[in-house]
Image: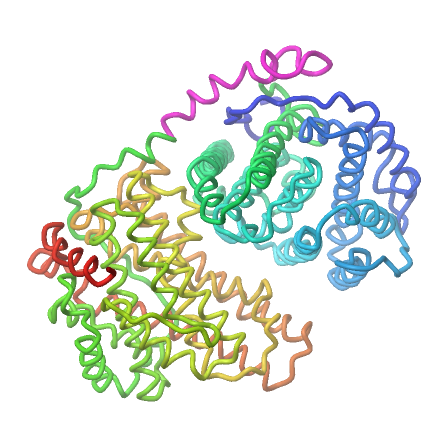
Amino acid sequence: MDGQPFELPEFYVPYPARLNPQLEGARRHSREWARELDMVDVPQRGTVIWTERDLDSHDYALLCAYTHPDATGPTLDLVTDWYVWVFYFDDHFLELYKRTRDLAGAKEHLARLSAFMPVSGVVTEEPTNPVERGLADLWARTVAHRSAGWRRRFVESTRNLLDESLWELANISAERVPNPIEYIEMRRKVGGAPWSANLVEHAVNAEVPDRIAASRPMRVLRDTFSDGVHLRNDLFSYQREVEREGEINNGVLVLERFLGYPTQRAADAVNDVLTSRLHQFEHTAITEVPALCDEHGLDPAARLDLFAYVKGLQDWQSGGHEWHLRSSRYMNRRADLAPGVLGGPTGLGTAAVRIPASVLRTAPQRMRAFSHVPFQVVGPTPVPDFDLPFALRLSPHLDTARRLNAEWTRRTGILGEAVWDEHKLDASDLPLCAAGIHPDATVEQLVLSSNWLTWGTYADDYFPIVFGRFADLAGAKVCVARLTQFMPVGPEPTPVPVTALERGLADLWARTAGAMTAGDRTEFHSAVVDMLDSWLWELANQAQHRIPDPVDYIEMRRDTFGSGLTASLSRLPHGKRVPAEVYRSRPVRAMENSAMDYACLLNDVFSYQKEIQFEGEIHNGVLVVQHFFDCDRDRALDVVADLMSSRLRQFQHVVATELPALCDTAELDQDARAELVGHARRLEDWLAGILNWHKECRRYDEAELRTHPLPATGSALELLKHRAAGLR
């Protein structure tokens, strides 16, 4: 392979790359700009970061001319300067902080950069190095043309890009290779593609409306765009980063270590993930974005801006690929170059000649997502011996909670709607789960937790039976819209509940939210709404008979499992000594997400036969792995078990290493530190309680599934009539 560690795979490139005719002007401008700011041939603390030859050979103007083919000359100059700056920052950080493992100096360097990107006002700090001078100059030239909402988003993505460099440095110092989920999540921040997406808005002069910027479809577009950009870069940069620079934050290396693959096979697997993410981008743009526009009543001008933004992201993917094929920065010998692209005509006939073969080659992977045959007989699942190092503690109030939970379930009518009966309630035994995850709860708190778990589990059964089997997405949306009305954040009135779901939620909300602060109530409301919306996502996939993309599945599974809801419940009675921004910090989010992923995948293992054989379900992590890797169930189980183990190790790593560092950085007092450590211990109880519940309840036993299945479609017709009558 001529010294290359692997052959580059055949990439999925479904859009033609086009070259901006303003390329030469951008080259001249960026070269002069970099010289003026001392980025070229000027030592920084004794080290020359770039020579003029380095800058010319990297050719960032070519990158921007390909990724922003329709930008005007001045806009292309500005965007190119931004990319010169961000790559210089990366190499400057590498030479001065990564190679020297200077974590303290890195923190000080990054802390100063926030002063050069104010959300409002002007820069007042005096820059002292090329990184600071470049950021100050670019900020002044960019933000004056953009809305306050765009500025806030751009500040956040730039700050993430800068600050998460510390995560990379910490991993290098500890020689710690992240697990695949951790890597994908963190690469989005440190890799810079969300930042690039913000610049696409600027380049096409089409901002995403603030009211939809945080919605799932827009988030998925940004995330899939980011993952596509980063995974492509990982393939091209593996030789430079891993073999020459000692970098360990590279997707190919992550899969080498996690799956035990040789380098070539790991590279091919990364390319499969990249392809899957681009398929997800297209699926979201085609099926979810138009509905989002309708839901929010966007006018024609806003819709045109939105689709210009989507097209800009597509241009970036194709243009970024072309640049990687040509830049001296990357491994690209014998890469598949179409003749006549560089220096010749653009559009069809150049980069476009690879499109038909690219689409055909990846068609089997796309079709596999729609090929699952439901209700296959799979038999009992061989459950691995999960070695969870946290001791189980059960509440002494379990028997009382069981009795009171049964009374509450009957009172709300949950047992009278043809979905559950007394036997199903007993087999599920949700108070047992509550007793494990809240072992120190009072009787009142334990009953409330039991009621929430019972309501959520019942709703999880209710939605696919009532709406899924009829592909009634409209009815499901009406149901969700009504349910949200029973969770008032302020003094707004609520309607009269007419179904057991509504009565249960109205009662739970009144008992839970009444004593909350306004901020807690808003956060808790969001957690429940996220869970409800995630069930709509499941129904849409079920209607399309589409097994989700693996990354999308993992991230949505946290919501479908109700992880955010239960995590919020566990924090409520334990004080407010920890500032909200600490709970929102990367280490705490990483701790929570790793615990959530372990619990969600644990549920997928135990529920595999129930969901695949008896319910015809497609939302199961084992099934997702089966279809993505085109392997059998037992191999998929091994992969899922390994993923669970890696998430558990990450949880333990954060608790042991990152939480103490966070406490020091945030200067928390002893009470706040104790509260944060207590939060980690409650997550340990949460995991131990969930594992015990899965082992001890009868909800997933084959005998239970055969003798007491969930109602068939015919039985659910009675419920539909009841629901329709109640809503009239």
Magenta segment range?
A: 337-365
Q: Going by the picture, which residue comes out furthest to the left? A: 707
* Number of numbered discs visible in the structure rendering: 0
Q: Going by the picture, which residue comes out furthest to the front? A: 728
User: Magenta span has 212?
Assistant: no
Q: Residue at x 21, y 54 (%)?
A: 466
Residue 407 placement, left or right of 289: left
Q: Is residue 28 above or below residue 87?
A: above
Q: Position of residue 387 (x, y in %)?
A: 34, 65
User: Magenta span has 354?
Assistant: yes
- Closest to the observer, 640 or 321: 321
Q: Residue at x 81, y 60 (%)?
A: 115
Q: Position of residue 163 (x, y in %)?
A: 69, 57
Residue 122 lies in what quarter of the image? bottom right
Q: Is residue 537 visible?
A: yes
Q: Position of residue 303 (x, y in %)?
A: 55, 39
- Quarter holding the N terminus is top right
Q: Position of residue 337 (x, y in %)?
A: 61, 17
Residue 665 lies in what quarter of the image? bottom right
